[in-house]
Image: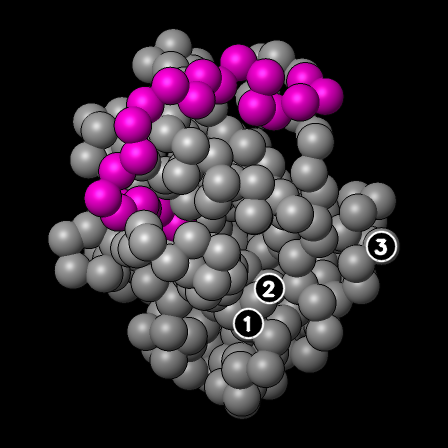
Amino acid sequence: FPVTIAIPNITASPSKPSANPMQDIEVSLPNPKEINMDGSVTMVRLIKQFQVGYSQKNPAIPTTFGIPDGKPNGTNKGLKALADRQIVIAANSRSLTPEEIRQGIRAIPIARDALAVVIGVKNPFQGSLSMAQLRDIYQGKITNWSQVGGADAPIKVINRANASGTQSLFRSVVLLDEPFAPDGANFVTWERDETTAILQRLGDDGISYTTVSQAVGQEIVRIVPINGVMPINLEDIRNGNYPISRTISLAVNRQISPAVKEFIDYALS
């Protein structure tokens, strides 16, 4: 089933709502030899689909995603590479900071995506978590599954890498920008921004989070309802009944080339 919702023509930045997210972007640079991109790991599937479609419309300009070896480095490093002019598009899964906006970076929203809280498929916990319980788990205040109605077993908490835009969103929405618990015996911050390895480590006592599209169909995990709601109904994501969601975007510098605009136009089409 679908896991993203196309929403062109919404707010282009957190500080300036706009009916046209492209309105202050200048198409004034020459076309590059290739459109090189980096950024959000959770947007890999979507970016690959854009690459395939774009290559059919404009085969003369190849596209790459992930520097230097085709492996994306996460939202934060992608935006840094964009600011440093190492790439022309950053796949972005969080709001831009005021400093990034001052640097001339602009985010063009392309979809709305939800995060799924996941546990191993053999985890005996069968209930729902409230946002308050989830916050307490990630701040080290709840440390045993029995405290949320599960078995008497320590909760192994796996946090995404600090480079991850998904981590930034989770901290903002779930922890209300308060800090995570420190790393320890049962709290681990993953070093690299990746998903598959985290899901494989959940076992029967772990908990983590990822984009819904990377959780659906995985045989080794189950999605945990939050506030009694599962992130599988598009209306629940649109209307905010499911509380952990975000806008994902393509970020560019204010000056772009016609080829980059064509790529963005294709993503919005």
- Crowd class of label 3 (few under 14; some 14 to 19; many from 20; radius 10 Å): few
Q: Residue 190, image x and y in percent?
A: 28, 58
The residue beneath circle 2 is: 212
- Crowd class of label 2 (few under 14; some 14 to 19; many from 20; radius 10 Å): many
Give the prevailing secondary structure in the magenta stretch: loop
Instruction: State the residue at coordinates (80%, 63%).
Output: 233
Decide which of 140, 190 is in the foreground and name it.
190
**Is residue 199 a member of the stretch shown in magenta?**
no
User: In the rendered structure, which disc, 3 or 2, sits on the residue that comes first in sequence?
Assistant: 2
- Compared to residue 134, the image places residue 7 above or below, namely above
Q: Residue 31, image x and y in percent?
A: 31, 34
The residue beneath circle 1 is: 215
**Which amino acid is tagged 1?**
Ala
Decide which of 108, 176 is in the foreground and name it.
108
Q: Which residues are magenta?
A: 18-40
* Colour logic: one colour
Residue 235, numbered label: 3
Which quarter shows the N terminus?
A: bottom right
Q: Are marks 1 and 2 in contact (CB under 8 Å)?
A: yes
